[in-house]
Image (cartoon, helix red, strand yellow):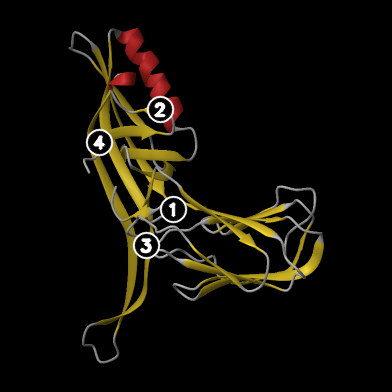
Amino acid sequence: MAITIGYKFGSFDLDSTNGITLESVAPTIVKRARYKTSISGKGANIQSDRRDGIRVAVKGSVLGSDDEDARTKSDALFAALTNGEQALRLWTDREILCRVERDFKTKFVKGSTMSVVEFSATFRSTRPWWRSTTVLSDSWTVSGSPQQKLLTADTGNAPTYPTISITNNGTTFTDKYIWLTNLSTEQQLGLQGVSIGSGETLTIDFDAGRLGTGSTQDQRPSQVDGEFFSLSAGVANTLELVTDVTSPSFGVAISWYPSHWRP
């Protein structure tokens, strides 16, 4: 399938629509490894090895019909780039959540029939992968324990973290446990002391590593065990839900953006 260039930061087009020409885009994987010299003196031993996200440096220019037009377009670019965390796209099918990390530099250039403002900016994402611009989703009705669900096959090539929402369609329950397991990787997340009212929803954001409430009842569990696990890339993952809720009646919604190693 052919891919198409589509420079965008959030809803702001980084192209001729806004008088912008990108001259260079350079993504860098932020990877840190630490070593310690071995006792024998024959080389070194690895102490830690981690990926801290991705940094993207861009350079370009803003073209205006006159000085005032160039200034107006530069103002719009500055407002867009400093608008917090947004999705940066280089191709129309992949993006990464990031924000401007370093100084946003501009330089007014004279000597052209049109006014030109050169600029450079560096984006930083805390996430180590790019994601698809298309979200995948699945739904699951849980009426017993344990129950399993074979998800739609992931289309990425890197681990991805889902969002799972559990809606209680039954009666209110208090001080119960819910265990979620990715049987494809044997990773688990356990919630102890969970209370969810009838019709309320507990949302688990595995990417951010947090629990959402979205209701008037405090749904925070008394204890969280295991880990906010990922889905394996390129395969159909199988999830299992185990609970001690009597006659559970859950509507479960799962969504995720397939992840990729490259933009």
Residue bearing mark 2: 12
Element at label 3: loop
Viewer-side residue, 227 vs 132: 132
User: Which amino acid, mark 4?
Assistant: Thr
- 105 over 168 or under it: above or below: above
Element at label 1: loop
- 99 over 48 or under it: above or below: above
* Tag in front: 3 or 1: 3
Residue bearing mark 1: 126
Q: Is residue 69 visible?
A: yes
Residue bearing mark 4: 4
- In the image: residue 28, left or right of residue 166: left
Q: Which mark is residue 233?
A: 3
Element at label 2: strand
The reply to whether dot 3 and dot 1 touch (C-beta < 8 Å) is no
Compare marks 3 and 1 and give the one earlier in the sequence. Answer: 1
Q: Which mark is residue 56?
A: none
